[in-house]
Image (cartoon, helix red, strand yellow):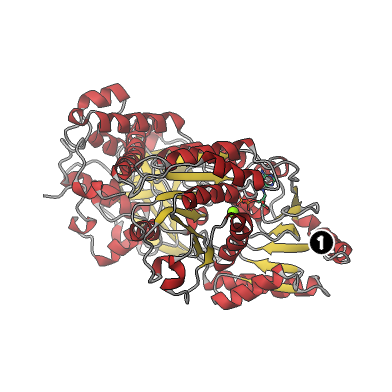
Amino acid sequence: MMDLNSPITNLPKVGPILTRKFEKLGVASIGDLFYHVPNRYIDYSLITTISRLHPDETATIHAKIISIKNIYSKRGLKMQIGSVEDATGKIAVIWFNQPFLIKTLYPGRSVSLSGKVGFFGRKLCMTSPDYELLGDVEKPTVHTGRLVPVYPETSGLSSKWIRTLMLSAFGSLNLDSSDFLPEKVLTKLDLVNLKDAIQKVHFPKNLKEAGGGVERLAFNELLNLELTSLRRKINWKKNKVANKLIINKSEVNKFLDSLPFKLTNSQVTATAEILADLTKDYPMNRLLEGDVGSGKTVVAAAASFAVFLNGFQTIIMAPTQILALQHYQTFKKLLTPFGVKISLVTSDVKKADLGRQDVFIGTHSLIHNKVDFDRVGLVVIDEQHRFGVEQRKHLVKKSGTPHVLTMTATPIPRTVALTSYGDLDLSVLTEMPEGRQKVTTWFVPETKRDGAYVWIKTQIKNQIKNNKSQAFIVCPLIEDSEFETMADVKSVTTEFEKLKKILVGFRLGLLHGRLKPPEKDSVLRGFVDRKTDVLVTTPVVEVGLDIPNATIMVIEAAERFGLAQLHQLRGRVGRGMAKSYCLLFSNIKYSKRLRAMEKMHSGFELAELDLALRGPGEIFGTAQSGFPELKVASWNNYALIKKAKDTALDIVKNPSGYPKIGRMSDSEANLG
Ligand code: ADP
Ligand code: MG
């Protein structure tokens, strides 16, 4: 028996080649296939007769081929020209560049033709209609004569293929009792059942019906996310910490009072939330979210100090060596006066050395380190999107069941935080420390590019006397992918060569992800040490890297970035005292999104705006930002997300009301 989980190879005519193509579309099982929803529909539902066709109308006719032949136009274009008839009349038909057509559509064959009616000379004609052979037995048409779905395609896998397969899949499965939600629940939620939804999405009678089908599939997708994170949260809370911690408020306050500044209100709140978590008997799993520069580090330092006071160790994991070093210096400055021993973990540190330390700081090499951490009370993960879930699990397992604090500067929109990160408790730093300057931001259209280079040169020159100003120039990745390709490296290298000719007399550095770690470190070091004036780079510019003397951020093809990402890049400058600028280069004339960057300076607001302005599937450069991608649902659909969240909660609370999914299976129980 085939079901939704069966691989598509179980369907007739699906071999390895087709399977690989479907893989590119994220489709492996028959269920995946049904969740591959159309981008749009072409309305071929008007079925009429030849005598009733009007110019300019889009219609479907059922007719017989009378004649067809390949001819060449004067310009050498190959055309297929013919005529068809039904009981009411005849009409000409033309296709272009499909010489093979005459092998299928030869005289005498019955066809269904859908398309726009136009003129050929003075006669009515259908130009490049979609066609489909009609057999002797009457059956519903797939590519013509209805609301025809147009799917996301990939090379060699057209909508026509997908439609054919969709029909065969739908026909070969018995979906009558496939729904995992009881009828009663569906009625309450005002959702159609699963079988109807699949039928309505792929074989709709009208657009409204299709919309209802899509809504149900979108709901399922969201419910799945909600349930996964909810169950993860429940499982997490089943963990017990090895040793309960006690917070020594007055000692922690001594540390906070020693800081050269007053904490912001949200730093105070976040610190309190974290310290409260540390006293629980299940481990903390909290996300500390705050714009670049909002001061997450001191909050983490306060937490690690509280852990130290209990005699336990803290592990701080940074995404890069350079950032680890930066944290090391900060922590040393802040905590050494209180007797805390801090250690930067590199590959050659010995086990014996580590035993006596209180705070370890390192990169993910910490995971592979031979050292067993035995007294770990807290793990802090900086910039979580750089770490895979697997790595994180590994580290947490390796160190017992410690409290986990994850920090990120990526503004996660509310809806995303509620669904995909629903298992994490959230602390948000909503304000910047006082006196922090805003980075003046300009949208720079192509016509102003030359002027901008002149301006940059003067800026660097002017400030060079007191040794202050440096610039980043960021080039986008060519394809929207998480990793850099050779093409990206080539393009940033070309840009680098070009800029050398434009910024004559300035010292340029080149940074991209394909550099070996020592090369990368040395390029970055050169910039940190002011040996270079301009750093030309792909978007790898280290997240969180603190270079106070960099005051200019230039972003090429800025329209290709999501606002959240632009905001993060902009956060690389404006970290020192000097006035800082962000220049958004773009060859488009006007962009609402880029103009918004000039006015808005909160990462959260920008992320929400981007979500509102860009459609599903294009959420702020999903692949690059590491955000979860939705196939069917949209992050903008607050109402549906709420519905899914409430349903997930209800499922967990009243499992008996949901016989098919109420109880957690073993595999699900391991998700945490
Ligand atoms: P991020 O959240 O990006 O990690 P950091 O923790 O690196 O930010 O803090 C950025 C800078 O702001 C640091 O130099 C830090 O000492 C400083 N800082 C943090 N909190 C405050 C505050 N409340 N008032 C003034 N400066 C602060
Ligand atoms: Mg930081």
- The three-letter code of the residue at mark 1 reads Ile
Residue 72 in the image, given as x and y percentages of width and height: 48, 65
Q: Is mark 1 on a helix, strand or loop?
A: helix
Residue at point 16% right, 36% down? 176
Residue 93 in the image, given as x and y percentages of width and height: 41, 50
**In-image side of 130 versus 618 (left or right):** left
Splitting the image into four quadrants, where does ligand 2 fall?
A: bottom right
Give above or below for 520 relative to 147.
Answer: below
**In-image side of 35 versus 443 (left or right):** left
**In-image side of 314 versus 130 (left or right):** right
Give above or below for 18 relative to 596.
Answer: below
- Taking depth in this image into account, of 78 and 558 the one nearest to the observer is 558
**In-image side of 96 versus 500 (left or right):** left
Residue 554 in the image, given as x and y percentages of width and height: 72, 58
> How many marks do you count on the picture?
1
- Taking depth in this image into account, of 37 and 465 the one nearest to the observer is 465
Give above or below for 78 relative to 254.
Answer: below
Whether residue 581 is visible to the viewer of this picture, yes or no, is: yes
Residue 323 in the image, given as x and y percentages of width and height: 58, 63
- List the residue tagged with mark 1: 456
- Taking depth in this image into account, of 254 and 409 the one nearest to the observer is 254
Whether residue 410 is visible to the viewer of this picture, yes or no, is: no
Name which quarter of the figure residue 138 lies in.
top left
Residue at point 34% right, 52% down? 401
**Furthest residue toward left:** 1
Mark 1 nearby-residue class (10 Å; few <14, some 14–19, many ≥20) = many
